[in-house]
Image: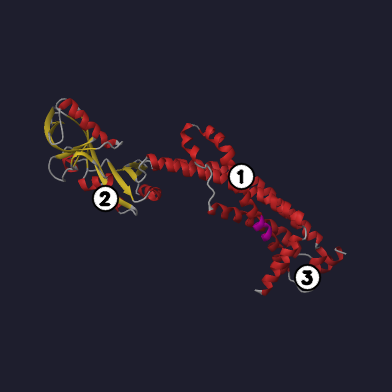
Amino acid sequence: MGQGLDFARIAGRQILRRRTRLLLTILGIAVGVAAVVAIVSLGEGIRAHSIDMISEQSDLTLIEVTGDVRDGTIIPLTAAKAAALRGITHVTGTAPVITADLATPHQTYVGAAGMGWEDFSTVFAPEFSKGSGYSDSGSDAILGSEIAESLRKYEGIRTGDDLTIRIREYDTSGAPVDTEVVFNVAGSLRPRGDMFDTLLVTDSARLEAWREGYGAYDTIYLRVDAPEHVLSVAADVRELGLQAQGPFEEIEAVNRLMDAVIIILSFFTGISLFVGALMIINTMVVSVYERTREIGITMALGASHRHVLALILLECLYIGILGGIAGDLLGILLSVGINTLGKSFILEQLGPGFAGFAGADITLVTPALLAAGLGIAVVLSLLAGVYPAMKAARLNPVDAIRRGM
């Protein structure tokens, strides 16, 4: 412990002997770190605000699952798949759905969705303008706001009335056979802004009777407990060989775009980090050259090669810490500058779709980002110091003393 403190003090005194050189070296690495912090904060800010906008406009916790085709094999939505989906962590409800295209005797088109009432209420939380829900058995159905208004206007069907549906099937000879089925309109939904505004919803058993032998669901809807878990649930769904769709795909697209932008821009800012590393190498090589006799005397008095190596690397560590802190501070200033001076230009280039960013900061500096900036500076400084440290550690004490005279 005592030796470590001695090394730390000696290394600190050494880097302070040439303060102008130290400041220039710190500035060199700080500029690179600041550029990385500013660029990443801009990307993360745009990413965060984009996700917030998507969250406000969409139901992020709803996932629509459909079958898929893998290697020429059709993977349907069977009861077994539905059970597997229910077992996924963070899934709070599932609604297996079958669909049908129906029509009234007056040829009013009625799209229908069949699912259990408990599943429907758990996943979609319906609100009624009139009436109530349907039972899992019987002839009840509910209507979306738009189809309810259409049937009321053109056929005089209201909540509580019977709705006759004509089902066309074909006999063994291929001749059409029409069958009339009667639904009791138990309720009508409030406007939702989704597909259910135009659908008749009833228990799936009624629709399954007209799809005998089909043996699979058309869609299974999942309700996830929180938006931050949606992407992981979607990944689990895809591992089952199924497709996962929903508003979360917009977030995936934003993440892919911003990851690509950050990587490309960080590549160019990495050039400044490379220059900073070269400055550290140059500084430490010159320092070793200037202190050749001193290092030789130190080794002659008993310092090992490992001790010399540790001292040089400690100096590099100090430079990295100071450069990282300076870079973080400068990066914060650059981020503030982007928000105050460059925001209007950036939003103009992004287009009207990003007009909602006008009232908020478009950069996001997080503690994790600042820690990463400091870490980059420290690691880069230590790597840059390896060559000068090894060069110093390999000095022959006698030759070093002679050359320094």
Where is residue 213? Give x, y as percent.
19, 41
The one nearer the camera, 404 or 322, is 322
Structural crowding at the residue carrying mark 1, measured as other residues with C-alpha within 10 Å and reported as few (<14), some (14–19) or many (≥20): some
| Circle nearer the N terminus (1, 2) | 2
Classify residue 244 as left or right of residue 23.
Answer: left
* Amino acid carrying mark 2 in the image: Ala
Q: Is residue 302 magenta?
A: no
Q: Residue furthest right?
A: 405
Judging from the image, what secondary structure is the residue with disc 1 in?
A: helix
Judging from the image, what secondary structure is the residue with disc 2 in?
A: helix
Residue sitting at 27 percent across and 36 percent down? Answer: 191
Residue sitting at 55 percent across and 35 percent down? Answer: 344
Where is residue 255? Give x, y as percent.
47, 43
Q: Are marks 2 and 3 in contact (CB under 8 Å)?
A: no
Q: Which residues are magenta?
A: 317-322
* Amino acid carrying mark 1 in the image: Leu
Where is residue 9? Give x, y as percent.
71, 67
The one nearer the camera, 312 or 81, is 312
Quarter of the picture containing the C terminus is bottom right
Structural crowding at the residue carrying mark 3, measured as other residues with C-alpha within 10 Å and reported as few (<14), some (14–19) or many (≥20): many
Q: Is residue 320 magenta?
A: yes
Q: CA distance from mark 1 to mark 3?
A: 46 Å
Determine which of the numbered discs, if any, sits on residue 299 in the image.
3
Main secondary structure type of the part rendered in magenta: helix
Q: Nearer the viewer, mark 1 or mark 2?
A: 1
Determine which of the numbered discs, if any, sits on residue 80 in the image.
2
| Circle nearer the N terminus (2, 3) | 2
The one nearer the camera, 212 or 271, is 271
Which residue bears the numbered disc 1? 334
Residue sitting at 61 percent across and 46 percent down? Answer: 333
